Image (spheres, grey):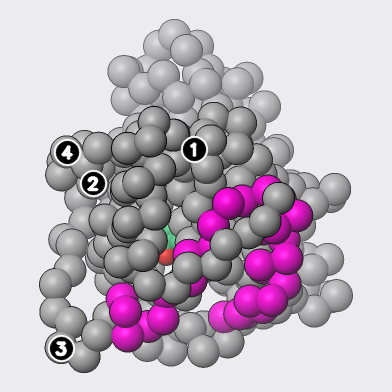
Amino acid sequence: MTLKTITSPERMYQWVSRAVLEGRKVGVVPTMGALHEGHLSLVDAAKAECDLVVATIFVNPTQFAAGEDLDQYPRPLENDLRHLKEGGASIAFCPAMEEIYPRGYSTYVSPPEIAAPFEGLHRPDHFRGVATIVLKLFQMVPAQVAFFGQKDYQQTLVVKKMVEDFNLPIEIRVCPILREPDGLAMSSRNVFLSDEQRGRAVAISKVLAEIEPEILRLTDHSSALKNRLTGVMETARKRLEVKVDKIHYLDVVDAQTLQSISDTTTEVVIVAAADVGDTRLLDNRLVKIR
Ligand code: PAF
């Protein structure tokens, strides 16, 4: 399988439009590069459903705040292209910064309300940047289906709501988190962890995995799950606190609304964000409760 690399948004748009006109189904996998098996599982999911797969590689500055790791973010382009070729993607779309945010660029998407809690509280303009770049990528790559990883769970909700609110003609698929053998969620940022930090980082997935059976144990068909979980979450927080350097949040909420669990909640998500050293790690687990 040959991999074509395209850098021009116009060429990218023409290529996908032509393929769609010819009756082919095109899938897009938006990424910031530094590809790992998690990204490649998105390419696999796209290949299973589509005739052609476009993977985008663009480290989007507008989703990083000042002082975050934009400059340090890994950019192993050659390696990424090799992975995409071996993974069977059809096109790598790698636009230059000036193509995406030329001088004078000033239009941004105001993200939906679901962007407000968790990441939105801790990284105020993050989802404004994500929604803007994802909308732009969908314009440049007019594919029929887009594939995102569940690891950035809130991001998937933001993107789905934006697609609905803007009537975008694209379907969103969310693919499961890929984990290292010990459970750590795969992330491009894991390369920043020293051996010692890597050993502690696994606590995040372990604590989430321990909360899941507690939720199932406390679940019945009445309300008040939220109150009965308070003790479970306090214990979980204490267990995590001693392993990581900072917990940004650790919570269980309704998986659709990211609000408190209510009588109508059918699925919850356990969400966590924590720093290990200077590396901010995210993880989550979905649990059906009814
Ligand atoms: O999940 C990511 O890698 C990024 O947030 C995305 C969706 C590619 C937008 O830059």
In magenta, the rendered stretch is: 73-100
Regarding mark 3 in the picture, which secondary structure is present there?
loop
**Contact? badges 1 and 4 (CB < 8 Å):** no
Between the residue at mark 3 and the residue at mark 4, the CA separation in whole angstroms equals 27 Å
Between the residue at mark 3 and the residue at mark 1, the CA separation in whole angstroms equals 34 Å
Rendering coords of residue 150 (x, y %)? 53, 43
- Residue linked to disc 1: 174
| Image vertical order of residue 231 relative to residue 228, above or below | below
Regarding mark 2 in the picture, which secondary structure is present there?
helix
The first of marks 2 and 1 along the sequence is 2
| Image vertical order of residue 166 relative to residue 22, above or below | below
Rendering coords of residue 89 (x, y %)? 61, 51
Of badges 1 and 4, the one in the foreground is 4
The first of marks 3 and 1 along the sequence is 3
- Residue linked to disc 4: 167
Q: Which amino acid type is shown beneath numbered disc 4?
A: Asn
**Contact? badges 3 and 1 (CB < 8 Å):** no
- Residue linked to disc 2: 162
Q: Which amino acid type is shown beneath numbered disc 3?
A: Gly
Residue name at image x 61 percent, y 46 percent: 43
| Image vertical order of residue 220 relative to residue 259, above or below | above
Residue name at image x 14 percent, y 79 percent: 106
Q: How many marks?
A: 4
Residue 128 versus residue 279: which sits nearer the camera? 128
- Residue linked to disc 3: 104
